[in-house]
Image (spheres, rainbow, N blue to C red):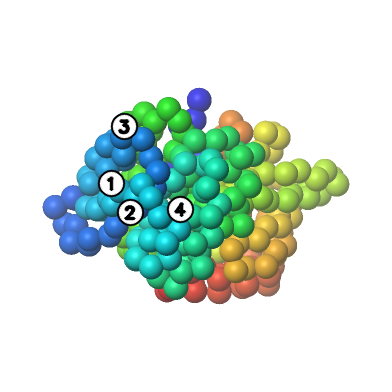
Amino acid sequence: MEKSFAASALAPDSSYSPSLRKTAARTALVNLSDNSRALLAECFRQFGIETVVISSDAPVRLRKEKFEACVLPLSEGAEQVMESARLSPSNSRCVIYGLGGDVRQSMRYSKYGINAVFDEPLERPAALKLVRATQTLVLHEFRRYVRIPLMTEVGIVCNDGRRLSASSIEVSSGGMSVKCSEDMPPGTNLEVSFALLTLPRVWIRGSVSWKKPKSFGVRFAADDERRQKLKSWIDSYLES
């Protein structure tokens, strides 16, 4: 069973060296149990990322303090915290990790741009793999990282007329990876539609470039000019 939504699609940077880190990026650990806080603090620490425990007044602190990332349970109160972060000038682009919940539950929060989800119960190897896969985005090191882990609903229309629903794993200006229960052979032509935070819904033609059990990659058609809207949004996202 997959232990994270994003880790299976994002390859770790083999050139990473903890001794080279100078960034004091901060991740807020919001309303987590003692065991979860300890495990995640250890995982983030390995990549030079500081963790800050928040057990009360989370919406207020996420609105006033600057954090590069935030981890919170996908349970009652999560929506208020996410909304506070996204409305904050300082945290509108912070990386949001959910804890627990399946894909359907996670999609409830897609309008807040949830980036990735840790499965519960937390297991150290899976948690570390997910942090490794996303730490470049937290640390704002984009020179070799152009794929953004971001979970949102994706509509798919196949050339044979089938209409499918999926959820995104990561997105770039050239394509995206999605979770979907349908078997999609490489080479299948389709059109995807999705919205991302401040980006209104876009439709882009593409084809299946690879497949794994319950997930596949889509390469966008090079001649589809609608890709430009996505590229502009990604450039703005990375620069903010």
Q: Is residue 170 visible?
A: no
Label for residue 119? none
Q: Are marks 1 and 3 in contact (CB under 8 Å)?
A: no
Q: Nearer the viewer, residue 106 or 81?
A: 81
Q: Nearer the viewer, residue 147 or 119?
A: 119
- Secondary structure of the residue carrying tag 2 is strand
Q: Is residue 166 visible?
A: yes
Residue sitting farthest toward the top: 1
- Label 3 and label 2: CA atoms lie apart by 16 Å
Q: Which residue is mark 1?
A: 44
Give x and y (percent) for residue 86: 50, 64
Q: Earlier in the sequence, mark 4 or mark 3?
A: 3
Tell me what residue is drawn at x 38 percent, y 50 percent. Answer: 56
Give x and y (percent) for residue 60: 42, 62
Q: Earlier in the sequence, mark 2 or mark 4?
A: 2
Q: Is residue 185 above or below residue 68?
A: above
- Mark 1 vs mark 3: give the one in front: 3
Tell me if 238 is positioned left or right of 230 in this view: left
Q: Are marks 1 and 2 in contact (CB under 8 Å)?
A: yes
Residue 182 in which image quadrant: top right
Give x and y (percent) for residue 214: 61, 33
Amino acid type indicated by mark 4? Ile
Amino acid type indicated by mark 2? Thr
Judge the density around disc 2: few (<14), some (14-19), many (≥20) Cα neighbours within 10 Å.
many
Q: Nearer the viewer, residue 213 or 168?
A: 168
Judge the density around disc 1: few (<14), some (14-19), many (≥20) Cα neighbours within 10 Å.
many
Q: Which residue is mark 3?
A: 35
Q: Is residue 142 above or below residue 36?
A: below
Q: Which residue is mark 4?
A: 96
Q: Which residue is mark 2?
A: 27
- Label 2 and label 4: CA atoms lie apart by 9 Å
